[in-house]
Image (tube, helix red, strand yellow):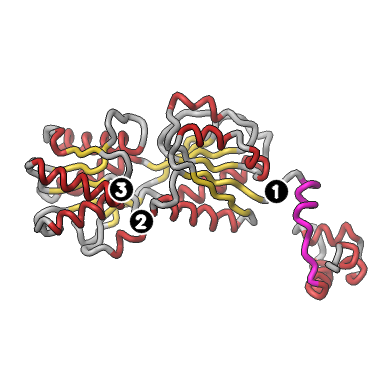
Amino acid sequence: MAATLHDVAKLAGVSIKTVSNVVNDYVHVRPETRERVQRAIDELAYRPNLSARSLRSGKSGVISLVLPELGLSYFAQLADAVIARADAHGLIVQVEQTNGDREREIAMLSSPRRQLADGLIFSPLGMGQEDAELLQVDYPMVLLGERIFGGPVDHVTMRNTEAAKAATELLLAGGRRRVAVIGAHENEVIGSAGLRLEGYRQALDAAGIAYDPRLVTYTTLWHRANGAESMAELIASGAEFDAVFAMNDALALGAMRVLQHAGYRIPEDVPLVGFDNIEEADYAVPSLTTIDPGRAPIAARAVDLLVERMGDPGRPESAEEILVDFEIIRRESH
C-alpha cells in the first residue's frame, strides 16, 4: 500500500501537521525537522495526493495556455517558453489550440476544462476588438497577441509597428528603395499583419519613399507555402523590387526558396528580412536576418503576471498593458 501522511509523521516522530508543512514547503519549519521529515518521505517513497490537496486548497497547480496553432514554430516555441517559466513556479501547463477559429476561441473561455486550471494565458486569432467584453471572466487571465487592446484583462504583447519599421529601415539603410512585403492581410488594421504593415509604411514615409501597393502581397495564413506562393506571384507580376520584408520567418523561408529558384542571389540581389526569430531562421542558407520580438520575455511576463493574479484575487481590477522590447538579429540574408 502507498505510504500515507500518517506513516511519514510516525516514522519522523512529528505531527501530521508538520509533515504537511514540509510537503507544502511552508517556510517556518526548523531545518533539522524538515530534514528528518524529508528522510522519512524518501524512505517510504511517499507521494502527496494531489487531488486531495487540490480539493483542500482550491488550487489545481495547473494553468491553461490556449494558442492558435502549434504547427507554426513561433507558437510552438512560445509554448515551450511558457512551460519552462511555469515549471519554475511549480505549475503544470495544459496546452490547447484553436486553429484561429473565433467560435472555438469564444467556447474556450467558458469550457468546463477551464475549471481544471487556476488561470489562463490566452492568445486569440479569430476574435477581434469587438469581442473585448467577452474577456470579462471570473478567473485569472493574461491576454497575448494583437487582436484585442484595452480589454478588461492583463495584456502582454510585442511592439509590432516599431519592430516592422526597424526591419524596413534596415533594408532602406542599405540603399534599397523598392522593398516588397510578404504576408499582408486584406483590410486589417488591428492584428499582427495590420500593425506590421503600418510600421513598413512609416519607414517609407520617414525616408520620403512613396508607398506602392504593387509591392505588397496578401495571404491568409503565414506558413512557408504562403510565402512561396506570394513570392512567385510578385515575381510573375513584373513589379520591380530590390528587397523583401516578410511578416514572419515562415513566410520568409518560403520566399527565400522561390527567390533562389528564380536565380536571385540573397542578399546581393535581394536582401531579405523576416520577423519572429524562430530557430529555423538560424539554419537557413543563407541564415535569415530577422526581428526577435521578445518571445521569451513575453512568456515570462505572462506567466509571472498570471501567478500574481492567481495569488492575489483582491488586486485592483485595472488591467496592465505590457509591451516588450524587440531586437534586430543580423545574419546572412541582409
Give coordinates of residue 243: x percent, y percent: 14, 48
Magenta part, dominant SS: helix
Instruction: Determine which residue is flagged by label 1.
Output: 60
Which of the two discs, 3 and 2, labels the residue nearer the N terminus?
3
Q: Nearer the viewer, residue 244 or 229?
A: 229
Find out whether the residues at labels 3 and 2 contact each other: C-beta distance under 8 Å.
Answer: no
Instruction: Determine which residue is flagged by label 2.
Output: 278
Which quarter shows the N terminus?
Answer: bottom right
Three-letter code, disc 3: Asn
The segment highlighted magenta reads 45-57
Three-letter code, disc 2: Ile
Instruction: Determine which residue is flagged by label 3.
Output: 248
Q: Residue at x 45, y 24 (%)?
A: 130
Which of the two discs, 1 and 3, labels the residue nearer the N terminus?
1
Three-letter code, disc 1: Ser
Find out whether the residues at labels 1 and 3 contact each other: C-beta distance under 8 Å.
Answer: no
Give coordinates of residue 275: x percent, y percent: 30, 49
Q: Secondary structure at mark 3?
A: loop
Q: Residue at x 59, y 52 (%)?
A: 93
Q: Is residue 2 left or right of residue 66?
A: right
Q: Tell whether position 56 is magenta.
A: yes
Give coordinates of residue 140: x percent, y percent: 61, 38
User: Which class describes the residues within 10 Å of circle 3: few (<14), some (14-19), or many (20+)?
Assistant: many
Which of the two discs, 1 and 2, labels the residue nearer the N terminus?
1
Whole-number angstrom distance, CA of label 3 to CA of label 2: 9 Å
